Image: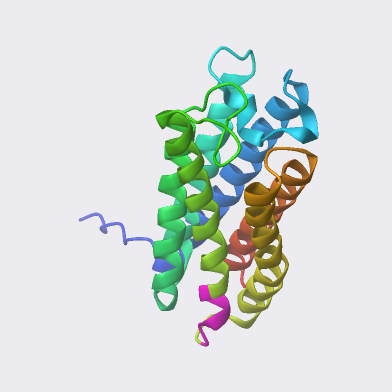
C-alpha cells in the first residue's frame, strides 16, 4: 500500500503564510505607490486615498494594491505563533479594515470633518482606514509586550511602535487643528511607510527565524 502523505508541519505552514504575506505586502505597496505617484492627485497636499477615487485612471491599480495589503495583513496574522493571539486578532482587524477602505471609495478630495463636509462613504472610508492603521500599530505594541514572543520580533515591533505612535498622534492632531494639507499628507505617508516596512520585516522574521 502506498504510504499516506503526512500533513505539513505547522512551522512549514506558518513560513509559507509569512512568505505570502511578504509578497502581498510588497506587491500591494508597489501598486498603491504607482497609483499615487503616477496619478493626477494633489501630491503631498492630499491623502493617499485620493488615488482611488472613482473615475481616476489609476483607481484600479490603487484598489488592487489595497486588497493585496489587506491580504498581507491577514496572512501575517496566520503566520504568527499561538503566543501572539492578541496581535494576530489586531492584524486580522487591520486586514478587514484595509479591505473595507478599498471597497468603499471616498469622494473627490476625500473630505473629512471638522474642516470639510463629508459624505457617508467618506466617513466609512476614512474610519476604516484610520481603524486599520491603528490596529496595525497596536499589533506592534502587543508583540512588544508579549514576553513569549521571539526577541528579534519583539525588538523590531518595539522600534516600529516607538516611531509610529508619536507620528500617529501628530497626524490626529494635525487633522483636527490644521486639516487637509502638506503636513497631514507627509505624516500620513510616513506612517503608512512604517507600517509596510514593519509588515515586510515581521513576515521575514516570522517566516525565517534565526536558529
Point 66% across, 77% down: residue: 152
Q: How is the image coloured?
A: rainbow
Quadrant in which the C terminus appears: bottom right
Point 63% across, 67% down: residue: 205
Seen from the viewer's position, the closer of residues 22 and 6 is: 22
- Examine the structure image and report whether residue 113 is included in the region drawn in magenta: no
Range of magenta residues: 142-147
- Taking the image as shown, residue 115 lies to the left or right of residue 1, namely right
- The image position of residue 169, as x and y in percent, is 65, 62
Point 50% across, 82% down: residue: 146
- Examine the structure image and report whether residue 144 is included in the region drawn in magenta: yes
- The image position of residue 63, as x and y in percent, is 54, 28
- Taking the image as shown, residue 161 lies to the left or right of residue 138, namely right
- The image position of residue 5, as x and y in percent, is 30, 57
Seen from the viewer's position, the closer of residues 11 and 66 is: 66
Seen from the viewer's position, the closer of residues 153 and 175 is: 175
Hey, which quadrant is residue 39 in on the image? top right
Dominant secondary structure (helix, strand or loop) of the stretch shown in magenta: helix
Q: Would residue 4 be seen by someone viewing this image from the given angle?
A: yes
- The image position of residue 64, as x and y in percent, is 54, 29
Point 49% across, 27% down: residue: 105
Seen from the viewer's position, the closer of residues 48 and 87 is: 48
Furthest toward the bottom, the residue is 147
Quadrant in which the N terminus appears: bottom left
Q: Would residue 13 be seen by someone viewing this image from the given angle?
A: no
Picture mark count? 0
Furthest toward the left, the residue is 1
130 lies above or below 204 = above
176 lies above or below 7 = above
Amino acid at each position: 500500500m502506498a504510504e499516506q502523505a503526512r500533513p505539513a508541519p505547522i512551522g512549514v505552514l506558518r513560513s509559507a503564510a509569512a512568505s505570502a504575506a511578504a509578497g502581498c505586502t510588497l506587491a500591494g505597496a508597489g501598486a498603491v505607490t504607482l497609483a499615487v505617484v503616477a496619478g493626477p492627485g494633489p501630491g503631498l497636499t492630499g491623502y493617499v486615498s485620493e488615488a482611488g477615487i472613482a473615475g481616476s485612471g489609476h483607481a484600479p491599480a490603487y484598489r488592487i494594491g489595497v486588497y493585496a495589503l489587506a491580504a498581507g495583513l491577514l496572512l501575517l496574522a496566520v503566520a504568527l505563533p499561538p503566543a501572539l493571539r492578541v496581535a494576530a486578532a489586531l492584524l486580522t482587524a487591520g486586514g478587514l479594515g484595509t479591505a473595507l477602505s478599498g471597497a468603499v471609495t471616498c469622494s473627490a478630495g476625500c473630505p473629512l470633518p471638522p474642516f470639510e463636509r463629508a459624505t457617508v462613504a467618506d466617513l466609512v472610508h476614512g474610519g476604516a482606514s484610520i481603524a486599520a492603521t491603528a490596529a496595525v500599530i497596536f499589533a506592534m505594541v502587543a508583540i512588544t509586550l508579549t514576553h513569549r514572543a521571539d526577541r528579534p520580533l519583539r525588538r523590531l515591533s518595539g522600534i516600529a511602535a516607538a516611531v509610529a505612535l508619536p507620528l500617529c498622534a501628530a497626524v490626529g492632531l494635525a487633522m483636527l487643528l490644521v486639516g487637509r494639507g502638506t503636513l497631514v499628507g507627509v505624516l500620513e505617508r510616513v506612517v503608512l511607510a512604517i507600517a509596510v516596512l514593519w509588515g515586510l520585516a515581521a513576515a521575514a522574521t516570522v517566516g525565517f527565524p534565526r536558529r
